[in-house]
Image (cartoon, helix red, strand yellow):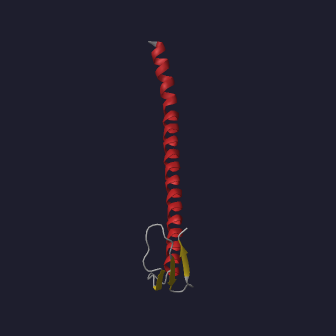
């Protein structure tokens, strides 16, 4: 019985310190998870902003969202399987482009 009382006294003396250690560990883990979540959110927002910027640039490149094909020409008019043809496409804001099948 004296051994049990002695071990109980030691346990009662150590319990506040172990409780404080567990609470501090839990607070640290919460801080780590919150900071990682916040960093990931910031990275995703930056990537989204970059994608939006690139999308706007592409939209402006193609005539403010309206792709305008000014002329389209294929020579010869009738193409059979295995024959070669020449296509000429002229877009708004660009010079004429030749597309050749190789």
Q: Is residue 95 above or below residue 44?
A: below
User: x%, y% of residue 14?
Assistant: 52, 29
Q: What residue lies at 44% left-to-right and 67% top-to-bottom?
A: 81
Q: What residue lies at 49% left-to-right and 70% top-to-bottom?
A: 83
Q: Nearer the viewer, residue 98 or 2?
A: 98
Image quadrant where one finds the C terminus: bottom right
User: x%, y% of residue 22?
Assistant: 49, 37
| Left or right of residue 95: residue 11 | left
Q: Is residue 30 above or below residue 72?
A: above
Q: What residue lies at 48% left-to-right and 78% top-to-bottom?
A: 59
User: x%, y% of residue 27?
Assistant: 50, 46
User: x%, y% of residue 43?
Assistant: 53, 60
Image quadrant where one finds the N terminus: top left
Q: How many marks?
A: 0
Q: Residue lying farthest right? A: 95
Q: What residue lies at 51% left-to-right and 81% top-to-bottom?
A: 88
Q: Is residue 76 above or below residue 12?
A: below
Q: Nearer the viewer, residue 10 or 76?
A: 76
């Amino acid at each position: 019985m004296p051994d049990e009382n002695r071990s109980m006294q030691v346990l009662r003396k150590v319990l506040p310190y172990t409780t404080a250690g567990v609470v501090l560990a839990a607070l640290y883990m919460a801080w780590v998870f919150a900071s990682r979540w916040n960093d990931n959110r910031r990275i995703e927002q930056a990537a989204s902003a970059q994608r939006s910027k690139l999308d706007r640039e592409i939209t402006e490149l193609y005539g403010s969202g309206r792709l305008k094909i000014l002329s389209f020409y294929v020579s010869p008019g009738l193409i059979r399987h295995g024959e070669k043809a020449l296509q000429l496409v002229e877009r708004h804001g660009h010079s004429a482009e030749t597309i050749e099948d190789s």
